Image: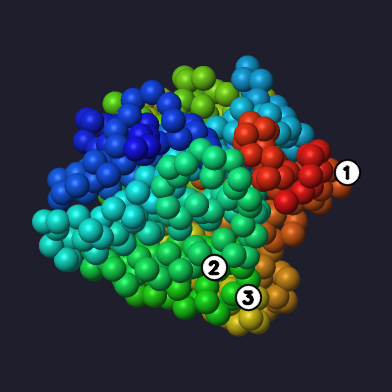
């Protein structure tokens, strides 16, 4: 009988399969897999464990978000960690520990979602509605995790069940990106079908499903699909928070803009403020380019809240404490509006595109753009939308993949001599264990 390591979430509420990499199936503390989820209480606890995986400092607790701006033109390395300069300079190597840590944290999260999806359908004592809610949330989480993998690495291994056999795992190959996207959409469809209406924002909800689908389809170029998904999300509530600063309150206070947020506390903290603030580690700082873009319009309320300059030093202020109890946004309404705006623009529905992104501008204290005056062509509208995405979502981890998705990364980052860096390397430790994975082009080794 194969026994697997368990990872306990906060307060030891759940026993979940965990792994330090996709192939690590046999370390320390062990419990038979068939004993992990056996009844309603353990099913509920398992779902909590699936959410707890988001809090890893290698995932949404810090590194995943930091790297999204550091690998782009929004942030610079200022500290002492040796793995971050290569990311900031787009000279990442396959043995980069920060990149490997993100990969591993996402696969830990996938393993927890997979276990819930596999075991909960047969658990006795769960009301059908609750069973559906648990499964729907697990499908949503798995879709989120696989999208986070595919947008950085392209083709990736795609286990859809808990890994129980190391020999099998060592034969893993990578699934083509297009097929991974098909699975992501299938998981979102499953989540939507299983979930009941909910206004919770620290748990997945139908609104979060629609919002995430609008993000995913933006990457696949399904413009009408983006519009439909974003419109469905907005139909469940379309108010922006009245002030930008209220989105990032130190105590994680609710706003009407919230769609899906990660819970943090002084005990289970994130380190975004700790990494960006001078009162913390200040391992990274906003770039001069981001500062100048925000400062270009002094009435932009995102400017003073996001950055501050003392002499020549720039501090990131978006996450206001080093305590780390802010409830970080994984997806919020402003992004959904900008997703739909871009899709409208791609389909030459420019008036609708401008109307959507103007809502974000006006909330930031800026005058609305007038079509035919401030912007006229589709390219101008797209440029305006991408500019708003940069300012609105700064330091929230979206900039690098936005540049890659829109085909601007090579020119904006000046990496014409190493354009392969638009995809991250498969961690060398994974390839050492499973040579069948292959490596992304440019990093040495064979391609998948």
Reading the image, the residue beneath label 3 is 345
**Looking at this view, is 198 or 49 the one in front?**
49
How far, Cα to Cα, is label 2 from label 1? 32 Å
Reading the image, the residue beneath label 1 is 417
**Up/down of 233 relative to 416, above or below:** below
Residue 87 rendering spot, x and y as whole percentages: 69, 34
Disc 2 + disc 3, Cβ < 8 Å: no
How far, Cα to Cα, is label 2 from label 3? 25 Å
Q: Residues within 10 Å of mark 1 (few under 14, many from 20)?
A: few
Q: Identify the disc placed on residue 182.
A: 2
Residue 60 in sight here: no
**Looking at this view, is 80 or 184 the one in front?**
184
Residue 237 rendering spot, x and y as whole percentages: 32, 68
**In this rendering, would 129 be left or right of 174?**
left
Residue shown at 62%/34% (left/top)? 433
Instruction: Work out whether mark 2 precedes mark 1 in sequence or the reverse, and give the earlier one.
Output: 2
How far, Cα to Cα, is label 3 from label 1? 31 Å
Q: Residues within 10 Å of mark 3 (few under 14, many from 20)?
A: many
């Amino acid at each position: 009988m194969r026994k697997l390591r368990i990872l306990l979430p906060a307060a030891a509420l759940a026993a979940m399969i965990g792994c330090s990499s996709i192939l690590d199936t046999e370390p320390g503390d062990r419990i038979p897999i068939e004993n992990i989820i056996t009844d309603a209480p353990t099913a509920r606890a398992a779902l909590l464990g699936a959410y707890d995986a988001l809090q890893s400092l290698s995932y949404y607790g810090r590194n995943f978000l930091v790297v999204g701006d550091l690998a782009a033109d929004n942030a610079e390395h200022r500290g002492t960690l040796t793995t971050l300069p290569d990311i900031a300079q787009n000279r990442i190597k396959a043995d980069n520990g920060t990149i490997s840590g993100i990969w591993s944290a996402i696969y830990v999260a996938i393993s927890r979602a997979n276990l819930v999806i596999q075991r909960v359908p047969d658990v006795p004592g769960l009301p059908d509605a609750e069973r559906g809610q648990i499964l729907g949330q697990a499908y949503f989480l798995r879709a989120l995790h696989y999208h986070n993998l595919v947008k950085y690495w392209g083709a990736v291994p795609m286990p859809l069940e808990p890994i129980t056999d190391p020999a099998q795992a060592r034969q893993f190959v990578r699934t083509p990106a297009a097929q991974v996207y098909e699975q992501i959409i299938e998981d979102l469809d499953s989540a939507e079908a299983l979930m009941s209406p909910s206004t919770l924002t620290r748990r997945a909800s139908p609104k979060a499903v629609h919002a995430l689908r609008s993000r995913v389809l933006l990457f696949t170029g399904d413009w009408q699909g983006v519009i439909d998904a974003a419109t469905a999300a907005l139909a469940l509530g379309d108010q922006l928070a009245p002030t930008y600063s209220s989105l990032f309150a130190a105590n994680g206070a609710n706003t009407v803009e919230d769609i899906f947020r990660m819970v943090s506390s002084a005990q289970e903290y994130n380190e975004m403020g700790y990494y960006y603030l001078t009162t913390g580690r200040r391992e990274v700082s906003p770039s001069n380019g981001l500062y100048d873009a925000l400062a270009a319009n002094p009435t932009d309320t995102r400017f003073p809240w996001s950055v501050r300059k003392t002499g020549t030093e720039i501090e990131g202020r978006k996450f206001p404490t080093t305590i780390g109890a802010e409830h970080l946004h994984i997806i919020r309404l402003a992004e959904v509006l900008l997703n739909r705006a871009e899709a409208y623009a791609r389909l030459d529905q420019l008036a609708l595109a401008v109307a959507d992104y103007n809502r974000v501008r006006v909330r930031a204290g800026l005058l609305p753009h007038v079509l035919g005056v401030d912007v006229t062509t589709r390219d101008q509208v797209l440029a305006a939308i991408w500019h708003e995405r940069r300012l609105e979502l700064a330091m929230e981890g979206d900039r690098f993949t936005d540049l890659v998705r829109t085909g601007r990364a090579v020119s904006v980052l000046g990496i014409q001599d190493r354009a392969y860096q638009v995809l991250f390397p498969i961690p060398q430790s994974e390839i050492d264990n499973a040579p069948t994975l292959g490596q992304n082009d440019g990093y040495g080794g064979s391609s998948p």
